[in-house]
Image (spheres, helix red, strand yellow):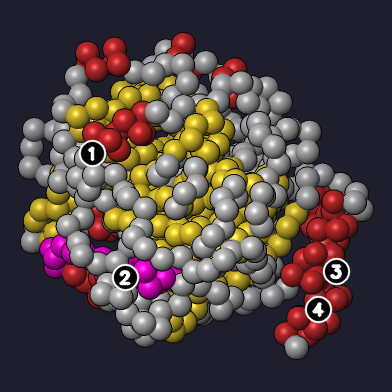
Amino acid sequence: MPSIAPCSCIYGILVLFLVTGSFAGDPYVFFDWTVSYLIASPLGVKQQVIGINGQFPGPTLNVTTNWNVVVNVKNDLDEPLLITWNGVQHRKNSWQDGVLGTNCPIPAGWNWTYQFQVKDQIGSFFYFPSLNFQRSAGGYGGIIINNRDIIPLPFAVPDADVVLFISDWYTKSHKKLRKDVEDGKDLGVPDGILINGFGPYRYDEALVQGGISYQIINIEPGNTYRFRVHNVGISTSLNFRIQNHNLLLVETEGSYTVQQNYTNMDIHVGQSYSFLVTMDQTASSDYYIVASPRYVNSSKASGVAILHYANSQGPASGPLPDPPNEYDMYFSMSQARSIRWNISAGAARPNPQGSFKYGQITVTDVYVIVNRPAELIDGKWCTTLNGISYLTPSTPLKLAQQYNIPGVYKLDFPNTQMNRHPKVDTSLINGTFKGFMEIIFQNNDTTVQSYHLDGYAFFVVGMDFGVWTENSRGTYNKWDGVARSTTQVFPGAWTAILVSLDNAGIWNLRAENLDSWYLGQEVYLSIMNPEIDKSEVPLPDNTIYCGALSSLQKDQARRYSFSCAPSPAGLSRTFLVVLIITLYGPFFFHVTAS
């Protein structure tokens, strides 16, 4: 099981106080992370990876809905760092989003404390470093948000959770990869596929060299496990399957789904799924867990882990379970369309998911967002959305808004592809607070692209090949389209989503494919409440300043910081937490370090 932070001893005591009622309000959980380089050989070649507290992948945040999460992050890399929480909605708190539009980066050698509440959310998510192609070197980990006890699961409680990170992997450093992308070079075929940071089991001696460490999942016969599977890669869609076992899909990115069995599932970049897997085989041998690349002409090895029954009679052998037809995107699209929202299940609240009847809400804004492959703009390689390649300003958008700094951005992002030369600009979508937005992603690239929206779950209501038209709305699913935060868009195809803009802040809409994102395929939505919204979290007291506000920054020491504005009860809780850390922190740090 992944371990938590080095300070888990004191944190456990603090959580105990909070949960047992010594402190009022929703519980706080505390994590202390050091992000640093490690040396690993996932594909048999020594290389530099990014780990957290010496772990690659990093620790899993296992919390319950409405808990307050405090993560103190020390940056021991040699370049700036931000951590973003993929799919965690940060209700009215975009200050904690961990992207350049809302946060100044954490300089090398500095720390910053994130604090956010996982408000009214459940499900499977992950975090990762959002800057400078760092995700291609690791730095990622899982987030599990559990139901409160009063909200029943729509299935029997599993015997245990299994968290799996599947990813394409390159033996080049993240710095070399980003330089290649800047120079207009294609990423090329990945050198391999990792599962939980490990290379493949040697299922084929011609493909997999000896001596590579692989993941083993130990299970008990007859038990049912919840496999939470995340594609944390940078550009490759992956097909996930477990030899001779069905995958009962039950949740994706915070929404319970209609429960359906699959023999395999295409998981695109940035997506997360939960499957219930029952250990119902004879265990005459171990079984393969496979993640293989899709739509990539490659002779490189698939990612292979081992499912080991306690009563297994021997090692796995023979060919891997068959994947779908390598280039059959129609299969993948049909599979994606088959994923439906379980409208009768409660999630973070007692009421059924389907009580929000999204198909009956009047759309207030429509954006047809068209991408293009990388092209030269003013001598630099750029990717665009609606003809605009996003330019990151030196002053984050949210800080510029807070301090009324003019000229940092414009609220003029076009709602469709413009008939003009592409340009580089800082152009935002001006969203209507409590409006209902329809976004159509039209993929003019040659590869599958994934798009993610921070701060929200959106309804995936349609996808098809060809060019979207007004008539395409007749094919929309307006009843049980699944709500999620990342959707795939197939090449030469479109995907339509609907989103209720009820979360004030400035939120990042981006390509999850790192090469597309790094070269400019992102935009921010500005969602401002026209009235004074006292419930929106104010500027954190530990804010890092940069750009036009650099003069406000003071030297930072490693410290614990509580950036949310607490209630009076919360102030008492914060005081007690700080008091305990001050009085007893050195003792616990000494104990846990020994």
Q: Nearer the viewer, residue 323 or 501?
A: 323
At horizontal 52% and vertical 28% (from top left) the residue drawn is: 258
Residue at mark 2 to residue at mark 1: CA–CA distance: 27 Å
The amino acid beneath tag 3 is Ile
Q: Is residue 96 left or right of residue 369?
A: right
Disc 4 marks a residue whose amino acid type is Phe
Nearer the observer, disc 2 or disc 3? 2
**Cβ–Cβ under 8 Å for marks 1 and 3:** no
Is disc 3 placed on a helix, strand or loop? helix
| Gap between marks 1 and 3 measured at Cα | 56 Å
| Residue 381 as seen in the image, left or right of residue 4 | left
Measured along the vertical axis of the image, is residue 357 above or below residue 42? above
SS for callout 1: helix
Q: Which numbered disc, 4 or 2, marks the residue that appears first in the sequence?
A: 2
Image: 356 above or below 294:
above
Residue at numbered disc 2: 204
Query: Which mark, residue 329?
Result: 1
Indicate which disc residue 588 carries: 4
Q: Amino acid at mark 2?
A: Asp
Mark 2 packing: few (<14 Cα in 10 Å), some, or many (20+)?
some
Which stretch did the figure color magenta? 182-204
| Label 1, label 4: how far apart the Cα atoms are | 54 Å
Among numbered discs 2 and 1, the one appearing first in the sequence: 2
Q: Are marks 4 and 2 in contact (CB under 8 Å)?
A: no
Whether residue 377 sits left or right of residue 39 in the image: it is left
Circle 2/circle 1 CB separation < 8 Å:
no
Q: CA distance from mark 2 to mark 3?
A: 55 Å
**Is 194 inside the magenta-drawn segment?**
yes
Query: Of callouts 2 and 3, which one flags the residue occurring earlier in the amino acid sequence?
Result: 2
Report the disc number at residue 580.
Answer: 3
